[in-house]
Structures are given as structure tokens and as C-alpha cells.
Amino acid sequence: MKPFVLFLLLTSFICSAQLKSGIWRGVLFLNPNERTELPFNFEIKTVKGKYQLIIHNAQERIVVNETILKKDSFNFKMPVFDTEFKTKIIGDSILTGVWINHTKKENKTIAFTAKYGNSMRFLYVPGKPDKLYEGKWEVTFSPGSADSSKAIGLFKHKNESAYVDGTFLTETGDYRYLEGMIHNGMMYLSCFDGSHAFLFVAENNGEDINKADFYSGSTWHESWMGKRNDSFKLQNPESLTYLKDSTKKINFSFYNIKDQKISLDDAKFKDKVVIIQVMGSWCPNCMDESAYLSEVYKKYNKKGLEIIALAYERTADKERAKTNLTRLTKRFDIGYDILLTGFTGKEKASESLPFLNKVMAFPTTIILDKQHKVKTVYTGFSGPATGKAYEDYTQKTEELISELLSRK
């Protein structure tokens, strides 16, 4: 490197504001008028002369390394998802700015601030570890309304304390890693992963969760309630989406991110077991499934497995869609083809895959045998935050793959 160029780089770094390394507490102001604040923690450290963030959600750690420091501005782009933070540095221990979600057409900006040195997620005095919320709950979202839906709530105290981790399983996916605490009998949980911006507040009357709120971003709010029920089950995810006519062969043809036309009839897929992943780069459950399927592909590809992802992006800009999918591919070292369908939303996905009765969730996963007959269609995905549900799903899936590969 030439001395003058090196001098400019060093001068730029020296003249820029600095940030303290260590734990920070960030807050998204979902509704400033109602003081609805979504907190989360992250760590800042320096790696090879560049700032890196690590966002904490329960057991999850999200490494953010697309950061730009320029004078008093510190901007960072979330991995996988098309969202970013634009902030100003005050001193060396405060950030203030906005979080921008580029996948939204409206209300895409939420105010944000962060302060160094506070490892508490919610600024409340911890309550007694009385396990008011411990265990499995039958949950109803929007009770009594036309949009009412069921879920399973799973909550667990950390090390016999008032601090709680949890998630919700639904028939279209899970709510990933939620983290929070109990205070005065109330449970507070939050999650921020770059796409999800979730806040849950619940009140327990000593037996049931009789009053609770769920906030998602700055535009969604609904009530929910729950009762303990260890035997409660959701509908079978393999019964929700199915072939209209099981006697007909399925097919499709789209271009991949390298502009190559890919069809299920291609020689590459002949006499191969094939997994079709209906997904989008904007979808957190799809991110979890992509991480899993990437490892499945490495494990079974040489034995005769192929995977095709059909991407339904939230942008009509082809190049932006390709950029988002390329970032996803690099993040999880995905070796299988991801095809750009050019369609968005569940209705368009259903139109583009007319052999299915409907697409009701991203992801939806179709497994074909060597003759490309559909063996199962699985709606949604229970990710690693769901614990046993994830373990059960992965075990069952790989048993099916192994069985199909063993057939002639």
C-alpha cells in the first residue's frame, strides 16, 4: 500500500468518532407516543481495525460485520435481511438514529438509540423466580376475533432466576429466540434479529395468562391469552398444503441467481431425491431452514440428494433480489440452486405452483422421491429455538431422506 493512501486511511480512522467495546443496550421505539420500547442487547468489538456487532437473543448470537464508521456516523447492515441502521455517535457511549427495513413499502423507519454498559434487557427489578410462566401453554392470538389463531407458548426460567427465554410455535413457523424477565408478576420478552422486531408483555392471574399484548414493528399489535396445556397440539403441518391431483407430475422452470434457467426436468435432477424449498430471503424461518438445509445438502448430496429453493422476494427489482439472495447464500454457504420466481406473497406463490392447493406459509417444503413423486409437503418450519420440535423435525426429515435414497 502506498504511504499516502495509508496516511489517508489512518487519518480517516483517527478523525472519526470512537465507540466503546463491550455490552450495549439498544432500544427500538415502536410507538413513541405510547412509549412502547423494544429492548435488546449487543456487543461491540474491534476486529482487524473494524467495528463488529454481536446481537444477543437468548442462545442466539448474530454477528454483524457490514459496518461503516465515518466521522460521527456509524451505519451497519444486518446480515441476510435487507435492513440497516443509520446512527450518529454521541461521545463514545451513545448511538442515536433509525432502523430502516427496506422490504416494507410504508412505515419502514423506526427510531433507535443505544447506550454502552448496560447488560439488562428490560430495566426492571427482577421478580421472584416463582415459575409463573414456566412450561407449555395453549395460546390464542386475537381471541374472539375473525383472525383468531392458535399457538404453543414455550417459556423457561434461566438458572432458577427471574430471567426467561421462550418462543411460540404456530402452524406457519415459530417466533424464534425470545428473551426477557419477570417483574411484579408480568412477563416481558423481546427479539430483534434484523427482520423480527417482536415485543411480548403478559400478565398472569396466578393460573392463566389472561391479559397479554404482542407488538411487531411499528404497525402491528394484537392481544393474546394462554392456559397451561401439556397435551395441546397444532394441526399436522403435513396436512395443510397438498397436491390437488396426486396422479399428475409437478414441474416448474425459473432462473437462478446466475441467470441460468433451471427446470425439474433437467438431467441434474434425474433419478435424484429432490427437496423443494419455497422461501424468501426476508423470512426469518426461511433463514433458519436454509441454514439447516445447507448442512443437509452437504451431508446427502453425493448420495443422490438435490435441493432447489424457489425464492419469493419482497422486491420487484431483480438485481436487488439477486443481491439479497447472494448474501443469504454466502452467509450459510448454500451449495444448492436458488431460483428467482419473480413473484411475491403467498397468493402469487400459489398461482406459480398450481399443483398445490395453496401456499399458506414461508417456508413450505416439498420432498420428492427419485421418480419425483411427492412424498410430503410440510408447512412452516420449527427452528432451533423450539428445542425438541426442531430435533423431532430434523430427525424425521433425515430418516425420510435416507429411506428415499436407499430405494432403487
Image (cartoon, rainbow, N blue to C red):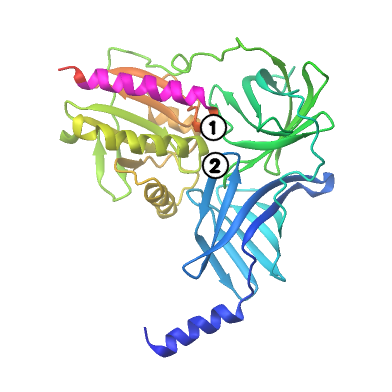
Q: Nearer the viewer, residue 197 or 144?
A: 197
Quadrant that contains the C terminus: top left
- The percent coordinates of residue 134 (x first, y second) are 69, 23
Q: Is residue 301 left or right of residue 354?
A: left
For the point 43% across and 85% down, which residue is it?
Answer: 5
Depicted 389 relative to depicted 217: above or below? above
Q: Is residue 171 left or right of residue 97?
A: left
What span is in magenta?
Answer: 387-405
For the point 46% across and 33% down, which residue is it?
Answer: 348
> Element under label 1?
helix
Q: Is residue 400 magenta?
A: yes
For disc 2, the marked residue is: 60
> Element under label 2?
strand
- Quadrant in which residue 140 is drawn: top right
- In the rendered structure, are the residues bearing label 2 and label 1 in contact, judged by CB atoms less than 8 Å apart? yes
Upstream in the sequence, badge 2 or badge 1?
2
- The percent coordinates of residue 136 (x first, y second) are 64, 19
- The percent coordinates of residue 61 (x first, y second) are 54, 46
For disc 1, the marked residue is: 385
Quadrant that contains the N terminus: bottom left
Depicted 196 relative to depicted 272: above or below? below
Depicted 28 relative to depicted 384: above or below? below
Return the residue found at the far bottom: 4
Amino acid type of the residue tagged 2 in the rendering? Glu
For the point 29% across and 51% down, which residue is it?
Answer: 258
Q: Is residue 253 left or right of residue 243?
A: left
For the point 64% across and 67% down, which residue is it?
Answer: 19
Distance from disc 2 to disc 1, alpha carbons, whole Å, reads 8 Å
